Image (spheres, helix red, strand yellow):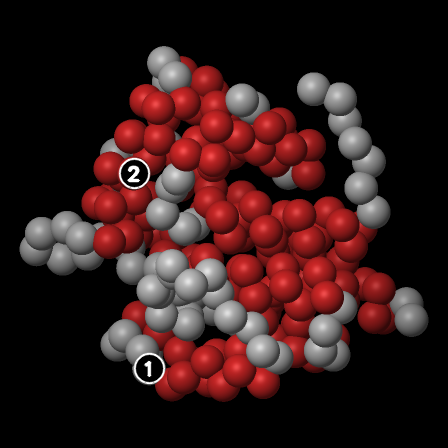
Amino acid sequence: METVELSEIETRKTAYKIFSRLFYYPGEEIARLLYGGVIGEWLEQILPGKEAERLQTWVASRSSAADLLEALQVEYTHLFITAYPNLPAPLYKSYYTEKELFGADARNLMDIYQQYHFKVSSHMTEMPDHLAIILEFIYRLLEKEAGDSLLKDFAISGLTDWLPQLAKRIEENASLPFYPSLIHLLQEFIRNDLSLQATQKSGA
């Protein structure tokens, strides 16, 4: 696949958009992009290392995009939607920061979304502190260059206090390598992004 050089801001926007889509319930479009190597090769380009390789290798081992989609949907449901007797790895911030669903963090995020007229797709019914929605909000801010840098920093740095707990639960309960690799790649990208923004501010 031909490598396309992106500007720093375009790379950031694309990354948050892709990670957001990957943490929503898997659909046919994502399965096609994964199976065709588009997403995996892009991840290997911006985050080279064993996790990107492991993710891409596992995806390539599936027999078809349909087979990949079925495997991801089953795994996503098990990890993030429903499992007996307890849900292994909820994707909600307030679950980890407040030990409850729709806590203060979720309500604060809802207020921020309303302030910036951010609305998720009409068919999405997740709570405001769902990981995919937070990532989509960051992407939309970057896309529209809306809001100030403090809000963007808040949205991004606000992920670092609970993603390690989520990653641990995914690692302990996953039956496939996809989501463990994906959450580690997300954490690595956010660390790199925060470091880059801090460096730019200090040099400004």
Q: Would you say 88 lies left or right of 150 here?
A: left
Q: What is the x, y in percent for residue 166? A: 37, 57
Residue at horizontal 71 percent and vertical 78 percent from the top: 147
Secondary structure, mark 2, is: helix
Mark 1 residue crowding within 10 angstroms, few (<14) / some (14–19) / many (20+):
some
Please name whichever residue, 18 or 150, is drawn nearer the observer in this view of the structure.
18
What's the residue type where badge 1 is placed? Answer: Gly
- Alpha-carbon span between mark 2 and mark 1: 27 Å
Question: How many discs mark residues in the rendered view?
Answer: 2
As displayed, is residue 98 above or below residue 130? below
Marking on residue 73? 2
Marking on residue 83? none
What's the residue type where badge 2 is placed? Answer: Gln
Of discs 2 and 1, which sits in the foreground? 2
Residue at horizontal 81 percent and vertical 63 percent from the top: 199
**Residue linked to disc 1:** 103
Mark 2 residue crowding within 10 angstroms, few (<14) / some (14–19) / many (20+):
some
